[in-house]
Amino acid sequence: MDNLYIICVDDQQEVLNALEQDLSLFDEKMNVEVCDSAGEALELMDEIDQQGDFVALIISDQVMPEMTGTTFLAAVRKDSRFHDTRKMLLTGQATHQDTIQAINTGGIVQYVEKPWQKDILLANVKTLLSHFVMTKGLDYQEFIDLLDQEVIYQWLRNRT
Amino acid sequence: MNFSRQSSRHEAIITKYFSDPEREIQLKAGEVLLEQYEINNKLFYVAEGKICGYLPDKHLQEPVFEALDSSFVGVYSFFSEDRKSYSKVVAEEDSVIRYFDDNPFDLPPADTEELLTFLFNVVVGELRSRQHFAGNMAYERQATLQKLIQTEKLATLGQMAAGLAHELNNAIGSLSGNLRQLEEDISKDLVEGEHQQLADLFTKGLQEGQQLSSLDVRKARSKWEKTYALDKATIKKLTKSGIDPDEIAGDTVKALKAASLWNLGYLLHDMKTAATHATHVIQSVKSMGIANQSWSKEVKVNNTIEDALAIIRSLTKQVTLQRQLENELPDITACSGELVQVWINLVKNAVESLINNKVSRPTVQISTTQTADQIVIAIEDNGPGVPGELREKIFQPSFTTKVDGLSFGLGLGLTIVKRIISEHEGDITLFSEPGKTRFTVYLPKNV
């Protein structure tokens, strides 16, 4: 079975714990990891890649010391190993400029505002994971209850 | 119109046409020379004193023109067709006026020409000086208006802040009240009667929260994974609690219970921390709002700095913030809400300059010290500095105009900073070189 990772990055522990709790259903068949800095996340991603596993999704905060979410995501985007990794910016405070930059240089595809609503967050995560699984050509059946059926269906239809 | 360098020709004309003792008026300060719209056939020369023109019909307090000695008054009405004075002309000081009321064309032709040439210069000069006067007035009015707009903006913000603070305090009050109740109930119903070790775990979570970093947790996790065949979520909770796997002695049921009890305590701890933080932020915002625009003799400068830092915590997270606040500062007479604004503005400027210029190891240092009669607050950053040519301009109203999506109007720029500090009879100086920019604020101690 393919090993998929969801990595959450935020400098506030309480946010990480809340995220981890909300995303715990993904932990059954995938791995949800939390990091309190972008640097830690980059190291962890190295390890995951060396094990031959996949970083499917990154959920990052914007306002963090040392490295902002946008800078972090831009660094990930330049890394060919994580070319297909889906990125989500989760933040309570981003300026218009930050958002533009995150889309243009960080390649984020989803922007979620804090405080988030669990069901909306889960739906977004499922959608992004589905795109990742299908792009990579992984066996979607393994994860089917953690994916967005609609997205899978669209992919299969376009394939034929 | 004031001829500072009077030509001999000018003097000759004044002597010739404006020195008839029969045509001299002595005015005491406040006496009226001409009422508004009065018909005037005279051209007045102010020999001594000061004359001003007003527009009573427009209810303007300010004069529309000023005529000092050696200038002319009544120029417009004397030369206009209807001969009506458009303003009320009043002596500002005790004045001596001489006038000319002949028809210039009744004079001998040579005199007519001489006088008209002279008067032409007078008219043009008068036009110029009145225009200049009007320009100055317009400028002053605009400056006043700007200050008024900013004050209004602040007042509105203050009212909004007070309103928000009230609503949020109610909400948070209810949350923390229920939280306390929940904590009691859980302690009593769930934890009491449990094995002491497990009860302690709940208390540990409640009191300390999570002590381990996300990296520590990931490293320590494998020991739990090896010892217990439990689901990932439980393993994570157990690891976060910081207890050693050996303490549970391989008892899976106990481990499950330990995980959930620690987590319960931890969740309550987090919620309490969040509630406290929210309360603190609200208090800080309120302290700069309308409720706190009053002056007090017992303002603690260090507290105003802490309040400011609490408000902009998310901004300062991006830099290293160093505080060196002297503990033994005496209270000063100040408006604490306004001081909070000063610190917010200065720190915000520093952080923004560091971030925008991508300075490596961005650091902002805030220090307070005292001299015999002043409290000295310095805010220093290691940014690229303010270029020499801008150092003079930096406090001028037009200088800071940047509007950022984030700064919702709390920071109204260095002009406000300067104004507030002046109101406190203090002073602000700027020292700047590449790698070191320091704003120093001096506030007077209570006498």
Image (cartoon, rainbow, N blue to C red):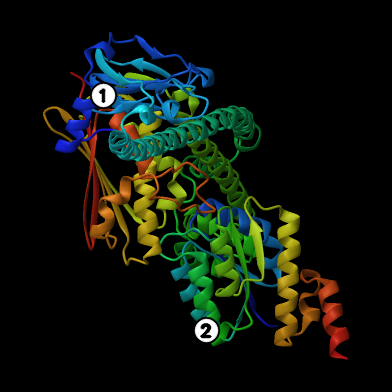
Residue B266 is tagged as: none
SS at badge 1: strand
Instruction: Where is residue A109? Give x, y as percent.
Output: 66, 71
* Residue identifier under label 2: A79
> Chain for mark 2?
A
Disc 2 residue type (three-letter) = Asp
The residue shown at (56%, 30%) is: B165
* In front of the other: B232 or B340: B340
Tell me the crowding category of disc 1: few under 14, some 14 to 19, or many 20 or more residues within 10 angstroms, Cα based: many
The residue at the far left in this view is B372
Q: Nearer the viewer, residue B78 or A97?
A: B78
Label 1 sits on what residue type?
Ile
As displayed, is residue B161 above or below residue A54? Answer: above
Q: Is residue B300 visible?
A: no
Q: CA distance from mark 2 to mark 1?
A: 56 Å
- Mark 1 falls within which chain? B
Mark 2 or 1, which is nearer the eye?
A: 1
Q: Whole-percent x and y of residue B163?
A: 59, 28
